[in-house]
Amino acid sequence: MKSFSREIAVAVVCVAMTTALNTKTIAQSKTPVPKNWQLLSYDTDSVYGTATEKAYKQLLQGKKSTPVIVAVIDSGIDTTHEDLKPVLWTNRKEIPNNGKDDDGNGYIDDIHGWNFLGGKDGNSLKEDSDEATREYYRYKQLYINPDSALSKDSKEYAYWQRLQAKVEKPSSQYKVSYKTMSKLQDNLNKCATILKNYLGKEDFNVAQLDSIQTTSQDVLLARNFVSRLLKSSGDDMPDSFNEFKSEFDEYISEIKRKAESTDVQPNANREKIVGDKFEDITDGKYGNNDVMGKFGFHGTHVSGIIAAVRNNGVGMDGVADNVRIMAVKAVPDGDERDKDVALAIRYAVDNGAQIINMSFGKGFSPHKAWVDDAVKYAEEKGVLLVHAAGNDGENNDSVPNYPNPNYLTGGKASNFITVGAISNGRGKDKVASFSNYGKEGVDVFAPGVQIYSTIPGGNTYGAASGTSMASPVVAGVAALVLSYYPDLTAKQLKYVLEKSATPLPDGSVMVNKPGTDDTQVAFADLSVTGGLINSYEALKLAATIKGERVQPKKPKAKMKAVRKN
């Protein structure tokens, strides 16, 4: 799930086309937003935060908590990071690196979790195709010519038309976009080299660009070009050039992949690296124990939001203070596969996770039944699932987004929360412009714009935006509540989080409708609760509820035999 939105990409192109020879500096007059704004309160900091710090100070002083295991199904985690290493879940029943499945769970040396994108040789799948392309090719292989082979009034034909609309025309459009954006990327790289040489820094921010005073036209043009690109992000403006560049490069890689979607066999990478029978859910013992890999930006960032070590004087603080993060790697660049998601959920449940964060999503789910069964399994075992709503600015009530809590067989999961993204409240857009929404399909909103967290590198941090960031905020609040009220069931925990959600704290009623330029809509109509997640209110409500979770009985201590004289 990508956070570099289509709207920002369009703005970037427009800026690049209009920047010309103007050498004036564009002034920035914003009051800086605190890096930890998602933890703060509107009453003290004028941001749409979760009142988490307020809760620690006013409600939790002197109270004891119990550890909560949160599984992060994502792209992998930097297990060496200074702010995450102390909070990693460790499988105590497994002996590290002995090549044996000591605990008999079917996964060898799964010390901190499991990698469902891994191969037997230790490699990992980095890039995979999107689900629409995989389905498009499957239908062409199955029917040769679906347009003539399928009955025009059949469900299969309607599905094929959806696939065509998603793959064929967009592919040609993406080829044009990729050509344009590649040229822009080249110009950006040239400007970056000029500015880094001039400033003597490997990274820089807007303020440093605006402070440049020189007669060099090359430097002034580079400054102008890059400054305008950064500012084109509006309220989502990154803290530094390298943050912007990282997201921009990832976005271009995604465009390239989509441009090539009709030219490249969609399962080739999977077959080569993972080697499983990806259409067979019973073929479940594949992958490897490398939960870190070389591409864990997303999962590392998500994990820090939930549980980065608090009050240790480095980096940033997570939401929850007594968490163990279980790393379950199942999300590549591209769309995650239903099989991996289903098995990742089951792995997390079987190994003790009480909360599972899922910051990913897609528009097609050919094996939704597999995922549904896993969600039901988690429901039966009392595990809460927290899922990102999506970054397409669309209505989840009418546009499919998977996974979701609606079972194919009817009914709805009682342990599933879907999360939209809110901004810090200081800009024009109150709701993140990219966030999906839905009066039935999204449960609650949470901070998801420019969230500062851990990133790969051992001691590195950066900001990112997306419902992918909003979901772990809610997972973190859930873990915080459960750690102090461990008797709550998953259903009760969901109730607490949603019932305690608050209206916009500045009194705003009408907000920008995501995915539109200037349409206004009632914030209450964008989700089931019409509210923002709030740690302080959730903890107060949890204190009034009698928990119904059945705790496992501790084995009775064996009596020592009395020694006979």
Image (cartoon, rainbow, N blue to C red):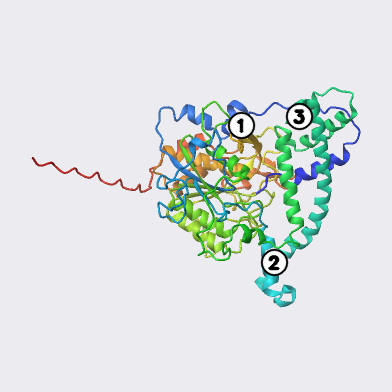
Mark 1 falls on what kind of element? helix
Provide residue 45's location: percent of width, then percent of height: 61, 27
Q: Is residue 234 above or below residue 75?
A: above
Provide residue 247's location: percent of width, then percent of height: 71, 42
- Closer to the chain start, of discs 2 and 1, is 1
The image quadrant of residue 20 is top right
Q: Which disc, if any, is residue 206?
A: 3
- Residue drawn at point x = 48 percent, y = 27 percent: 57
The quarter of the picture where the C terminus appears is top left
Measured in 3D between alpha carbons, the distance from the residue under mark 3 to the one under mark 1, in whole angstroms, is: 20 Å
Nearer to us in this view, 137 or 193: 193
Provide residue 472's location: percent of width, then percent of height: 56, 42
Q: Is residue 562 above or below residue 361?
A: above
Three-letter amino acid code at disc 2? Tyr
In the orientation shown, which residue stands out farthest toward the left?
565
Front disc: 2 or 1? 2
Nearer to us in this view, 249 or 362: 249
- Residue drawn at point x = 70 percent, y = 68 percent: 160
Provide residue 324's location: percent of width, then percent of height: 47, 40
Nearer to us in this view, 259 or 108: 108
Using residue 109 as the reference point, say whether residue 559 is left or right of it.
Answer: left
Residue 410: tell me if it is visible. Answer: yes
Mark 3 falls on what kind of element? helix
Three-letter amino acid code at disc 1? Trp
- Residue drawn at point x = 54 percent, y = 42 percent: 474
Q: Which residue is mark 2?
A: 137
All told, the count of numbered labels is 3
Residues packed near mark 1 inside 10 Å, few (<14), some (14 to 19) or many (20 plus): many
Q: Which residue is mark 1?
A: 37
Measured in 3D between alpha carbons, the distance from the residue under mark 2 to the one under mark 3, in whole angstroms, is: 45 Å
The image quadrant of residue 129 is bottom right
